Image (cartoon, rainbow, N blue to C red):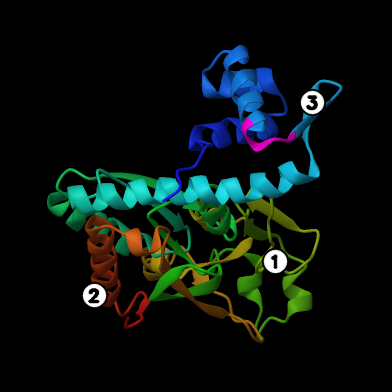
Amino acid sequence: MKSPRVTLEQWRVLQAVVDKGGFAQAAEALHKSQSSVSYTVAKLQEQLGYPLLIIEGRKAKLTERGEVLLRRSRHLIKEAVELEELAHTLGQGWEPELELVVDQTFPTPALLRALKAFEPQSQGTQVQLKEVVLSGSLEALQNGRPDLVLSGIVPKGYLADPIVEVELVAVASPLHPLMEEKEPINNERLSRELQLVIRDSAVESSMDAGWLGTERRWTVSSVQSALEIVVSGVGFAWLPKADIFDELANGKLKKLSLVSGSERNFHLYAIFGKGERTGPATRLLVELLQEECNACPTRVTPISA
């Protein structure tokens, strides 16, 4: 079998030079000297027999051949990293750390109970929890390799199990002017009141799901913030029923009587960010999440896997 002349480290250095915009920036990011970075790229080009980079001003720019090879090298390094992670999973049997990305519409009570049940069985696995909104889950998958993502959006190429059906309910404080309406409220009337909207947490792309399209809106960063503001009597919002169960029960919130759309239902999925390399700790957590969703039929609707 023929051995490769070019190393993964050489491709990694080339990627850094391109991504960071120059040799000095790449050296800083890689914690190497600039001369070491320059030598690595020069040696790579010498081994290939043609240039991959050209210098324009202070920036390094790929040649046409360089662009083709860089794209392939990104896949190569990604596969090498995944191979090492698979080897680690097979060797250790239990993940030392579990990165969990959760859409904020996931029922908080079920999530907290599942995490509580997971801790004594975790064998020391550390959980890194990140809460996102809407397309923030897609961005998390694009920018990293989270072990588990709980989201209503399943990107192409990922394994996912249905886990729960979430119900959003249009609510307001009992003191809100909308509660004085005798007839079911239409969109025209609703649009004259302030709506609380939860901001998409994605940085590079975002969406405005559930917004009526009027100028009267406040945008907040979390379900909890929206809940507290609506309870105070300011505005209305569609909020997850599981997270406002107590407020509905004690009368701090009331369901709005709308002509249509008082309730909105959608599925959330457990997306396995590492596919076949998913470890036992991640699979255990998914089982516990499903059990907790199944245990609360009055608050959320579970989905059989």
User: In the image, residue 9 lies at what x, y percent?
Assistant: 50, 32
Q: State the predominant SS element of the stretch in magenta.
A: loop
User: In the image, residue 276 lies at what x, y percent?
Assistant: 35, 64
Image mark for residue 54: none
User: Which region is colored magenta?
Assistant: 47-52
In terms of depth relative to the viewer, which is nearer, 141 or 134?
141
Q: Earlier in the sequence, mark 3 or mark 2?
A: 3
For badge 3, the amino acid type reads Lys
Q: For the point 66% across and 52% down, which residue is it?
A: 219
For badge 2, the amino acid type reads Ala
Q: Mark 2 and mark 3 in contact (Cβ < 8 Å)?
A: no
Indicate the quadrant where residue 156 lies.
bottom right
Image mark for residue 211: 1
For badge 1, the amino acid type reads Trp
Q: Earlier in the sequence, mark 2 or mark 1?
A: 1
Secondary structure at numbered mark 2? loop
Pointer 2: what residue? 295
Visible residue check, residue 130? no
Q: Quadrant of the C terminus?
A: bottom left
Secondary structure at numbered mark 3? strand
Q: Is residue 204 above or below residue 61?
A: below
Say which of marks 3 and 1 sits in front.
3
Please indicate whether residue 224 sits to the left or right of residue 70 in the image.
left
**Mark pair 3, 2: CA separation:** 58 Å
**Mark pair 3, 1: CA separation:** 43 Å
In this view, the residue farthest toward the front is 1
Pointer 3: what residue? 59
Q: For the point 14% across and 47% down, which residue is it?
A: 123
Say which of marks 3 and 2 sits in front.
3
Secondary structure at numbered mark 1? loop
